[in-house]
Amino acid sequence: MSEKRVTVTCADCNLSETFDSLGTAREFVEDHRTETGHEPTWQLPELAAGVQRAGDEAGVCGRPGCTDTDSPLYRGEE
Ligand SMILES: [Zn+2]
């Protein structure tokens, strides 16, 4: 289990890929969207969830309080 592991899943084609870097995962998601028109979702480590939200919404956010595990974007541990 890597601390930085990011899992990308796509419900439209049962895709599941794991990446060690957020940047690589992001590239994969964008490529998959472009190629298939699907909407893959990310499963990020807890520490990175706020980074993902901030990235989607505003680009950069350094505040830990931004992490929202109730967000539909967050699909980590249940
Ligand atoms: Zn797909």
Image (cartoon, rainbow, N blue to C red):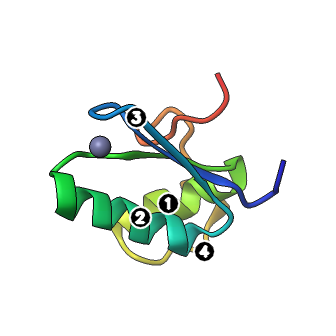
Q: Nearer the viewer, mark 4 or mark 3?
A: 3
Q: Give the quadrant of residue 57.
A: bottom left
Q: Give the residue type at disc 1.
A: Gln
Mark 4 and mark 1 in contact (Cβ < 8 Å)?
A: no
Q: Give the residue type at disc 2.
A: Phe
Q: Give the quadrant of residue 15.
A: top left
Q: CA distance from mark 1 to mark 4?
A: 12 Å
Query: As drawn, is 40 to the left or to the right of 25?
Result: left
Q: Where is residue 1? Give x, y as percent.
A: 84, 47
Q: Which residue is mark 3?
A: 72
- Indicate the quadrant of ligand 1 in the picture: top left
Q: Nearer the viewer, mark 2 or mark 3?
A: 2
Q: Residues within 10 Å of mark 1 (few under 14, many from 20)?
A: many
Q: Which residue is mark 4?
A: 62
Q: Residues within 10 Å of mark 3 (few under 14, many from 20)?
A: few
Q: Is residue 40 above or below residue 54?
A: above
Q: Which residue is mark 2?
A: 28
Q: Nearer the viewer, residue 16 or 77?
A: 16
Point 18% across, 52% down: residue: 36
Q: CA distance from mark 2 to mark 1?
A: 15 Å
First in sequence, mark 1 or 3: give its number. 1
Point 54% across, 43% down: residue: 68
Q: Give the residue type at disc 3.
A: Pro
Q: Which residue is mark 1?
A: 52
First in sequence, mark 1 or 4: give its number. 1
Q: CA distance from mark 1 to mark 3?
A: 12 Å
Farthest residue to the top: give it: 78
Mark 2 and mark 4 in contact (Cβ < 8 Å)?
A: no
Query: As drawn, is 70 to the left or to the right of 13?
Result: right
First in sequence, mark 2 or 1: give its number. 2
Q: Is mark 4 within 8 Å of ligand 1?
A: no
Point 67% across, 29% down: residue: 77
